[in-house]
Image (cartoon, rainbow, N blue to C red):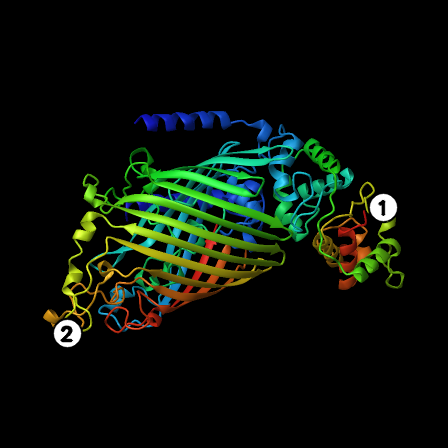
Amino acid sequence: MQCKKILMAAALVMLGASCSNIERSRNLSDPLITARTLAEQVCSNCHGIDGNSVSPTYPRLAGQQAAYIVSQLTNFRGHQRSDPAGSEYMWGLSRFLTDEQINGLAEYYSKQTPRRADVRKIDPALLATGKEIFEKGVPEQNVIACMPCHGPRAEGIGAFPRLAYQHADYIVKQLTVFQDNVGRPGTPMEFVAHPLTGSEKNSIAAYLQSFPE
Amino acid sequence: MSIYRSCLTAIIAAATILGAIATRDARALPVFARQTGQNCVACHAGGQFPELTPYGRLFKMTGYTIGSRTLPFSVMGVASYGSVADTSKSDSPGTDFQKNGTPLFATGSLFVAGKVTDNIGAFTQFTYNNYDSQGADGKFHGHSGADNMDIRYADHFVMPDNDLIFGVSANNNPSVSDPWNTAAAWMQYVPVPNPTSYQFIDGKAPFPGYGAGSNIAGLSTYLFWNKTIYAELGTYRTANQLLSFMSAGLSDPATTKLDGYNNPYWRLAISHDWGAHNLMVGASGMTAHVYDLGSDTNDPNNLGSFRNTGVDAQYQYLLSPHTITAQLAYMRQVNNYSVNTVAGATAPTTFTLADGVTPVAAANPSDTMNTFRAKISYIYNAKYGGSLAFFNLTGTTNTLNQTSGYDPAGCGGAICNASSVRVNGNLSGNPATRGFTYEAFWMPVQYVRVGLQYTAYSKFNGASDNYDGFGRNASDNNSLFFYVWGAY
């Protein structure tokens, strides 16, 4: 009987204490929750606490351009971006975010330090091809170089995303999304990526994932 | 129609209508998908509910609290078709193989689940079994009751060099709180229809499990440190009095009666994610003191115990469009029988060995069972999948479990005894059962799965041939199981 009372009391204390836990809340529809709390309690589950995600299902966000993060979260929230993975994972999570929270998340992740993933030894020929495409494009296929828009260190420029250290599998998947023109309108990438072959996509992705230090 | 059935039917209907209204702009349907707005595939590996992805495990460990509070109801239903290879070697095929080869609506569940506060969430399931029992007139009667329940408090502390999830779970089934799907409560997940023609489908074949079973009341506390070490410790008691909702639908005598609070459960696991891969290796155990008869808890001679110790491992590769899962689980169970059970084991003493002279051994005061399961599955594009599973149960031979044998006094040396049970009988007194299950499934939409399973036995109740003493072979139990399983 004594034990029952203690358990009931403990349950009531926990219930009372937990009604509002704004510093560690996972509530996605409360405008009072800070972007940092959302990053720690929700986003970090997939993207990593420092934005260096482990799984290539989820893009690395560390050091990403803030303007790019804002545009993507806004497009998820408004359903303008509707590629399958984007809509399956991100429409719901972003649906109630305020502009302030989106700006805060962009700032949080843009300030994280990108880490180069531990990648197994990659075929030097693949890297060389990737480097060539990154810097010079494939003129005979009308593929323009990546560097002018994404920066000499692939660090991104404003609305053009950072690509360095991004998961190769994620880059290949997004290039395919652009080629198939499914759900990522409003970027020049569908024209840029369209002529790329499968092996060229793999080369550029491998080069960007293991971008030289 | 029982009051349970009427209530549940009304609640499911109301929840379906309300759910439809509330989810018009939602991408995914059952309650957790409404809460996060995400598709099933975010939390379930390849969309294959209920197997969890790493994110799904974190969603569970943080108390089902990610997202926004929403209408906390979902419904689930299973329609099925089952067929057993041989229905002729039976005294009563109509009883031994009810509804064989007949499509039926098997079972439905109502879930009350989701985020309650920033730290509290729940997953509670009530299940209606359309074929719970059969009356003297041959008609089946439905029945509803508590199914899995897991009510949690959880907090997540993020520090510069440490990440700690801490939680408490009140639940009614040991390991239902576990985030990995090699846990006893989760490795078998396709709902099993009740008619006896389904008694040999994969869901009824050996799975590692805890002897105490479900519909008991437990409280466990757990932590997950740096997404690497998971530890959980809890204890269970009888689900009666204030906690009787955890065994709702069961009469008091039918409720599992545990002795006090000294029924501990523990779990340790190491998890590692790299690239698209993740691996868990773990161990778990439970000691439960269980009364043989729920109606008599005053007699200490009525008290037996189960001691379970298990190891398990799960590997997943998750990168669209591919999902690969490999699972291994092994559980050892030592069952110490109550004094009354051993004393009452008189029937086998009438049997002899095959020579018709040598008496069979006396009943053992305890038995040990070792259950092993391995499964590998592949899913393409969260739509088409298949799996292959192997199961192997071994254990001690005990005349206590022997239901048929040689009885020279009764039948002149032939196998016969009034207590013999054809189909379910056991001539050897050994539980050994082994086989494979092959499965193919299709998910036309994310909340519906259509599956076809074939389970093939090479051993059943201790033998490959004539396991029941009346000529039934293990392969006669091979079973086909077709199901349509949907949730909303």
* Residue B62 seen in the figure: yes
Helix, strand or loop under label 1 = loop
The image's mark for residue B52 is: none
Residue displayed at 16% across by 60% down? B347
Q: Give amino acid for label 1.
A: Gly
- Is residue B428 positioned above or below A42 on the image? below
Residue displayed at 49% across by 35% down? B167
- Is residue B350 positioned above or below A6 on the image? below
Please, which chain is the residue tagged with disc 2 on?
A: B
Q: Quadrant of the N terminus of chain A?
A: top left
Location of residue B437 in the rendering, given as x and y in whole percent from the top left corner? 44, 65
- Is residue B222 positioned above or below B128 on the image? above
Q: Which residue is mark 1?
A: A151
Location of residue B69 in the rendering, given as x and y in whole percent from the top left corner? 53, 36
Where residue B87 sits, quadrant-wise, is bottom left
Helix, strand or loop under label 2 = loop
Q: Nearer the viewer, residue B417 or B271?
A: B271
Q: Which residue is mark 2?
A: B413
Q: Give amino acid for label 2.
A: Gly
Location of residue A43 in the rendering, given as x and y in whole percent from the top left corner? 64, 40
Location of residue B341 in the rendering, given as x and y in whole percent from the top left corner? 20, 51
Q: CA distance from mark 2 to mark 1?
A: 91 Å
